[in-house]
Image: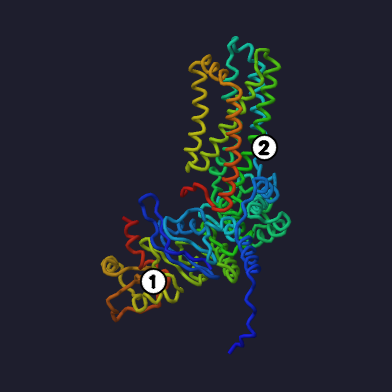
Amino acid sequence: MVDKHDQPPFPYEKSIETEITTIISKGIVKEDSLKNLLSSLYKQIGIRFIMKDYKEIITGVVLMALFMYVLTANGQTWYNNHTNYYGIIMLVSPILYMFLSIFSFIQNKLNGTYEVEMSCKYNLFQMAAFRMLVFSILCFLLNTIWIISLALKFSTFQFIQAFLISTTSLLLFSLLFIYVLSTIKTLAAKVAILFSWLGIHLFLFMLDSAIYYQLLESIPWYLYGVIICLSAYLYVKKIKNFMLQNKLRGVNGYVNG
Amino acid sequence: MLTVNNVSKKYGNDSVLEDIHLEFSNGVYGLLAPNGAGKTTLIKMLTTLLYPTKGEILYDGQNIFSMGENYRKLIGYLPQAFGYYKNYNPYQYLQYLAALKGISKQAANEKIPKLLKHVALEDAIKKKMRKFSGGMIQRVGIAQAMLNDPKILILDEPTAGLDPKERVRFRNLLSDLARDRIVILSTHIVSDVESIANQIIMIKDKQVLFKDTIQAICQKLNSKVYETEMEFEQVSKFRERYLSLSERQENGRMRIRFISEEGASSNWNQVSPTLEDVFLFEYRDLTLEQEQ
């Protein structure tokens, strides 16, 4: 029989509380910041593999830069005084982003590597989120350089208005892209929705270029500013959720086969 | 311990698996069933590629979907159709997958040559994978599944494309690996699992039919498997009455291995049932449907 005096003393209230706090803090999974998520992904996988299709990325950037150069160089001879630069900017700004972001998914589908990559610790979607963030910054810089060159060439061109239109277009599209990626299941449907964005703008541009120009010009700068701030906030928030969801929960929107 | 707890899976209104209950501890498990029985669906749920419609899958008491990357880093998986980047050589591809698996560059560089040697690809380390044969690709797949020294190794039809010599090497490799991990091997080829599996899991009618040792499963056909010889012209009539398991010509007569549930005739020799006999017996209706 155990002697009453041999039993350890019952802990004090304070030490019970300390123990409980320690257990809870060790048990709860801390939500990482976006910076930590990105930095751990970068450190672990490395830029060599995150951007493993760097040759295609460079080719895409060069081709888009060339296209922008052609548009800028030939703009004057092509168009009359009512040239709808703003419509072109709205249409062209997210194109490179779209191709770069969707490329890895298409490549993955064609090579049949999806299942292997999705069953790894860091999966395809976590890498896609990282890439998308990089691509939006890259496209923002390229678009800005293009707009500066347009502003230098055409005296009637309003740099601020064009810059706001381009950034709005890129951010709205980026936001649409990440929502489509997290909600739509098949690659074909994803591609169709994203192309329809371009299709709508192309349709508006071709339907009545002048009205489309007036519409884009009539939106005040502060409204563009609000849209940019709001979509940038939602985009970064969604990127973080997207990374966390794939880190913790596994496959996102996977369809058999 | 990996536990599949009353798991069901539906695609839309089509039910593929119903109330599956399984427990896995260290050893080789052969998941044996004909094509279309739901093996790959079960495997995809075990690798978190598919969510169960009902039920849960636990690893050491934790839901594998809640564990997320903490579970994924424990598994090694070879899918039925193993994809690869054609411009990569096996070394580059394994380096890439090692990074995704959370293995440091240094550890990967030490491990990859050993693994490629293990699967007899040491001479093709720097060769582009687009030049590889089906068997070589499959061996890269086996190597990548073992990169992270997984606690759970899941292989879906791993011997597809391997020649007999490679199959033997692969079986020996698995037996060696299974000492301290769970190995789940899905196949419809009985000989793939017959010599190495500690337990066989058979799926029929969307449910687990057997989960037992080979000896215990073979007991189900005890005193029901026979062999006999007969003239060729008698064979078709005999087939109508008994389930023929195998037939071969011998000394100008036909030697038939078959199942009889009615009792023995004097010129029949009772033989010990094999796993293949059980497989053919249990899935006889399915085989007939496929033939029709």
Q: Residue furthest bottom?
A: A1
Quadrant position of the C terminus of chain B in the picture:
bottom left
Q: Residues within 10 Å of mark 2 (few under 14, many from 20)?
A: few
Task: Count every numbered label the image shows and give the total.
Answer: 2
Instruction: Say which residue label 1 marks.
Output: B250
Label 1, secondary structure: give it: strand
Instruction: Name the image colouring.
Output: rainbow
Which mark, by number, is residue A55?
2
Kindly identify the residue that appears in the image at 68 percent across and 18 percent down: A151
Instruction: Report the front residue among A98 and B37.
Output: A98
Q: Is residue B32 above or below residue A61?
A: below
Which amino acid, by three-letter code, is at mark 1? Glu
- Image spot of residue A24 (x, y percent): 61, 62
Q: Is residue B240 above or below residue A180?
A: below
- Whether residue B159 appears in this view of the structure is no
Q: Chain of mark 2?
A: A
The quadrant in which residue A233 appears is top right
The quadrant in which residue B212 appears is bottom left
